[in-house]
Amino acid sequence: MTGFVYLTDVVTLQLDVEKCTGCRMCLMVCPHAVFEIENKRASIRNRDFCMECGACSKNCPEGAISVKSGVGCAAGILNGLIRGTEPTCDCDSGGGCC
Amino acid sequence: MNYRVLPGLYATGAPGRNSHVFVTGNYKLSFDHLRRALNGIDAWMLVIDTRGINVWCAAGKGTFGTTELANRIRLHHLDQLVDHRRVILPQLGATGVAAHEVKKMTGFSVVYGPVKAADIRNFLEAGEKSDESMRRIAFPLTERLKLIPVDLFYGKYYLLIVPSVFLALSGFTPAGYSFDLALHSGWKTTVNLFAGYLSGCALTPALLPWIPFRSFSLKGLATGWLVAILLASAGMLGSGVGDLFPWFLILGGVSSFMAMNFTGSSTFTSLSGVQKEMKTALPVQISMVIVGLAGWILTRFVDL
């Protein structure tokens, strides 16, 4: 199974190839195989697979990756709208969600 | 119920100075998954304080994070316990942990293991490497089904109130109120409402890959209308445009909204994507339900 694809052309993922040293960390942490190595540097293979979890940018030692990460969760976005905050899930009270 | 494990250093088997150190959060089910996967392996388990939340959610919030991990490594004097300088984290913890910063703060290298604890043995046998399938999150039917109960109770007490109101209102006719009517045909409104609700929060998730459209709200609308067609052909929605039209709006709107909520349980939707989807879907869903509700009530009192 190759997995699901959500909406296309929406994610905020950006890779600055100039800064990349080819350490492969982004390939290791990405749960959706978004990256590949091309000419010893990272490149984005499957942009639309990205779920904006932020693991790649967090673990890029060179700061070459940026993404506006957050919960891809309608209830969380509604929570944020109602409370006037960033999208947030209710895990602290529920325990079993997201 | 308490699903917390006391954070700290644990051991499985008889670990020594060269044994692996596995890190997890202090949610009991995460801890148990790891413990089970390590059965027969001598290893250390460093349980960090994620306030009883699983690794993935805690990493998203930053509680399964760089600082907490670095503090725990120091607190439990890991550098005196083992001769190597490596800790193995579940891959899904990477959202909260910056490996290079942990290295800077503690001298320990972070190695990301597989997504699932069950793959740890293969990971170790392959020389601490995950192959691509061990790094990816899939979302098979069994896992989608497990998540359905989370959303079933989204409506909370409205699940009682709304059907009761419909039941009571269903007794109205242009000629006056009929308790007989409410008793004998009112139950249909309850069935319809729950069918629309379940269409969105159970049927759509179960059939997710087989329903056309990418956006969850459209998937839910499609399923909701399919259910509405089935109900209509079974005579559940009443007859005439005054009954059918409102029911299609209500069932479509409710199913679409509940399906959209399942984005939070899914493993592949992005924040930007859900925001884009909601911008158009939410106003449409609300309008559908309001117009449908108004139309259905109007039909109780006016002969169309």
Image (cartoon, rainbow, N blue to C red):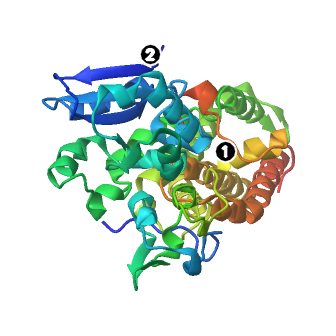
Residue B182 in the image: state x and y as whole percent: 69, 30
Residue B179 in picture, x, y percent from top left: 73, 25
Residue B185, image x and y in percent?
62, 36
The residue at which mark 1 appears reads as A75
Q: Label 1 sits on what residue type?
A: Ala
The residue positioned farthest toward the bottom in the image shown: A39
Identify the residue shown where x is 50% and y is 59%.
B268
Of residue A79 and residue B280, the one placed in the foreground of this image is: A79
- Compare residues B131 and B81 and report the one nearer the observer: B81
Mark 1 Cα shell of 10 Å, populated few (<14), some (14-19), many (≥20): many
Pinpoint residue B227: horizontal percent, then vertical percent: 52, 55
Q: Given the image, what chain letter belongs to the residue carrying mark 2? A: B
Residue to which mark 2 is pinned: B6
Please indicate whether residue A60 sits to the left or right of residue B22 in the image. Answer: right
Is disc 2 in the same subunit as disc 1?
A: no
Q: Residue at x 44, y 42 (%)?
A: B107
